[in-house]
Image: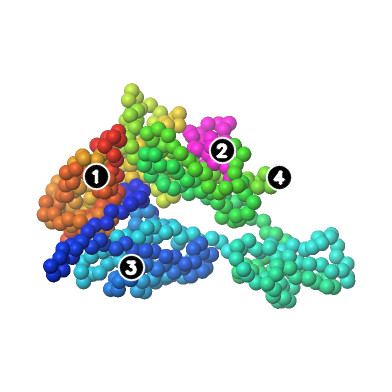
Amino acid sequence: MTYNSSRHYPTQLVSDRISSKAKGGSDWLTLPKATLNITPNPAYTGETVTLTCSVGSDSGWSYTWYKGNTKKVVTLSGRHSTTGTTFTISSAAESDQGLYWCQGEIQSRSISSIISDPVTITVKERPEAVLTLQPNWPQIFSGETVTLRCDIQAGEEIEYAFYNSGKLVSTKTEPEYRIDPAKNGLYTCEGLQKRNGLKPSQTNQPQAVLSVSPQWLDPGDSVTLSCWVKESSASWRFFWYRTVPYTAGLLSLSDRSYSVEPLSGNGTSEASYTLIPTGPSHTGGYVCRAGRGDPVYDTLYSEPQFLWSGEPQPSVSLKMRPNRTQHFTTKSLSLSCEEKGNTIGWKLKRYREKAVDSECGSNWGSIAGSKCTIMFTFSRDSGVYWCESGSGEYSNAVNITVAAGALILESPAYPITEVDSVTLRCTNSYQETNPNPRVDFYKDGVLIRNETTGEMNIPAVSKSDEGFYKCKSKEGESPESWVTVRGEKSSVCVC
């Protein structure tokens, strides 16, 4: 997964307008927005999932499908197919989970719709069937009557199949099967194509899973932490924690990468927790876990998930040279943690592929004081970078993309302020010192400007200029970058 500068999803996409002049008139038509529907959602592993894209009632549109917060075009595999307005995932797997988007285009008119709102596909394991005996006496005597009960947390109407030594003995719409008189045998039950024996199976300790939304923070945003347990969803209470530097004696993750501080005391039956950050920046890590029963049985902690702020703080900031979010491969990249007074105790870290890398100097960069240097960049160096102090403070974060293609888009690494001027530059890997002469610039997937200088200047930016930008030329296409715009009164650094 590549983290280009898609900081967070646009809360509002501003419709570009096209002129449609009829005889004797000059009407303005707003480009329509694509709508994405997914069924079923959530889905069980092995099910077929259908994504349907539509742009109003108009015909003649073809469709492009995107996945992930960087909106990469979906790569077709043996389980994926697309026909007309639909994209089909056969035999859904956990790897199919994530955000999906779609966009329509009419190639003969060279126009594209506004990209759809994102929809998250959730793929769950099929529910487990648990078979119990009533009454559950240590011994059952010949002639007694017993009842088998098959419990399946499916959340929908199903049929229950009961078996004796693998042979079907009854199919019922109710979860109970009465045996009168009792007979010897190994009984099992089945529902939704999931079969279990009478003895409940034992698995390894389950692990909680945490998601954070939004992951990139605007001033004043509230944040939702959502926690769930893969193996089961019943009877759990959820506990929420913030990560802090590892300290012996405190609750800590199994790999000792972080200790944790509780955000809530006794936990909650609600699977979500609302965080209302205060202050200029709340870059930081969070984990959750779940517990149930008496005495309490706890899951493992979730993998850390991070909330990032791009706002440089007055006390410490992450700086990079060259100062841009997109970089070519095989080049040098330097990052430093710059603090008023000193930089002792600060460590540079990065987040790639759903996991935190160890700090610079261990396996991906050379460290000298507060400066980390990656001598030869590769695509795998794409990710989110930030600084942490030994006392648990966090710097701003920067979303870096290392592109293997011929073009990159040079755009601001930090939020820019309304009414300020900003220049976007499309750079060719073979002519880094000179911008491309003829370039098309796109915002949110829609062509907005053709330039012969290789640069696009916005003399006074406004909130409507916030969005995803990329450039195209005859040499290829750059990745997308998210440009953040703050209000005039925001205290930000344009570096």
- Circle nearer the viewer, 2 or 1: 1
Q: Is the residue under label 3 in contact with that under label 4 (CB below 8 Å)? A: no
Magenta stretch, residue numbers = 238-264
Name the residue type under label 1: Ser
Question: 495 or 357, which lies in front?
Answer: 495
Identify the element where label 4 is drawn: loop
Residue at label 2? 264
- Inter-mark Cα distance, 2 to 4: 19 Å
Task: Name which of mark 2 and mark 4 comes first in the sequence.
Answer: 2
Distance Cα–Cα, label 1 vs label 3: 29 Å
Q: Which mark is residue 56?
A: 3
Tag 2 near tag 4, CB within 8 Å: no
Residue at the (86%, 62%) spot, across then down: 139
- The disc placed on residue 335 is none
Q: Please identify the quarter of the rendering in which residue 479 is found.
A: bottom left
Q: CA distance from mark 2 to mark 1?
A: 39 Å
Amino acid on which disc 4 is placed: Asp
Amino acid bearing label 2: Ser
Q: Which residue is mark 1?
A: 462
Disc on the earlier residue, 1 or 3: 3
Residue 445 image-quadrant placement: bottom left
Q: Nearer the viewer, residue 473 or 104?
A: 104
Q: CA distance from mark 4 to mark 3?
A: 54 Å
Q: Are the residues tagged 4 and 1 within 8 Å (C-beta)? A: no
